[in-house]
Image: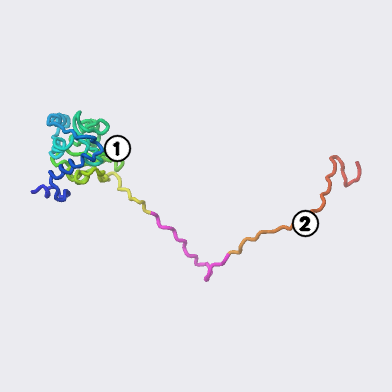
Amino acid sequence: MSETDAHPRRAGMTEDELLARLRARLPESRSWAGPARLATPAVIAEAEQVIGFPVPPLLRRIYLEVANGGFGPRDDVPGVGDDAWTSEDMDIVAMYEETSGRPGHPPGVVPVYDVGCAIMWLVDFRDPSGPMWGWDPHGCCLDHARAPQGLTLADWLVETHDGSDARSIEPQWVCKPKPVWPPERRPRRVPRADSTAPAGPPAVATPLTRRITRRQWPPPPVQPRPAPGRDTRRGGH
């Protein structure tokens, strides 16, 4: 089986061509202000001792031949070791140690890209082809936050070798149904026709009229009020 047949999403791009495109991106990278540093075989071997699985061959070649981090989506894939380009001072070993042992993070599945809001892309070091997993705790539940994405590390880097952002992670929905967006609107209620209503055009309501009070002019004289304690009707004191 040829390399193109093994990775149909590469659209005919060989591994050497992918490395060449990643290398051509480095002068415009947001991560490297100067020449990119490379990893050493000894540093990669130390990382494999901690992770417990070998680094996938494609990722190993990138670290040794192209750049020790600072490539891929938004030039933000971290490297390995103390001399690597890292995001928030965490190489892939530190990111692995931070997530390893948590629910949904089996051994050998290594974070390589932090999307934000606790969403991450992970590479499965247990398989040499590097299948990609997505971690999204906002989906179904924490037990099913890790979901397969149906592409390998090579496919993922072909889509993001120019520094563009990675595709959205597709969470899996096991414990509850996938929400529908935009939400469905309920049909508007249509009033039922009244069989007792008279036939013909609807009656027009009589408009409201305003009562107008005419004022007398000049106004009538005001009668003086009687003094307190005096009964004017009897004429007495």
The disc labelled 2 sits on which kind of residue? Gln
Q: Is residue 203 above or below residue 32?
A: below
- Residue beneath the point at 40% across and 57% down: 187
The disc labelled 1 sits on which kind of residue? Ala
Q: Earlier in the sequence, mark 2 or mark 1?
A: 1
- Nearest the viewer among 208 and 230 is 208
Q: Is residue 215 left or right of residue 143?
A: right
Mark 1 sits on what residue? 118
Crowdedness near tag 2: few (<14), some (14–19) or many (≥20) residues, C-alpha within 10 Å: few
Crowdedness near tag 1: few (<14), some (14–19) or many (≥20) residues, C-alpha within 10 Å: few
Indicate the position of residue 118 as horizontal and vertical percent values.
29, 37
Outermost right residue:
236
What element does badge 1 sit on? loop
What element does badge 2 sit on? loop
Q: Is residue 139 visible?
A: yes
Q: Is residue 42 above or below residue 181?
A: above
Is the C-beta separation of discs 2 and 1 under 8 Å?
Answer: no
Indicate the position of residue 168 as horizontal and vertical percent values.
27, 45
Mark 2 sits on what residue? 216
The disc placed on residue 212 is none
Question: How far is the residue under mark 2 from the one under mark 1?
Answer: 81 Å
- Residue beneath the point at 9% across and 48% down: 2
In the image, the segment drawn in magenta is: 185-204
Residue 195 in magenta stretch: yes
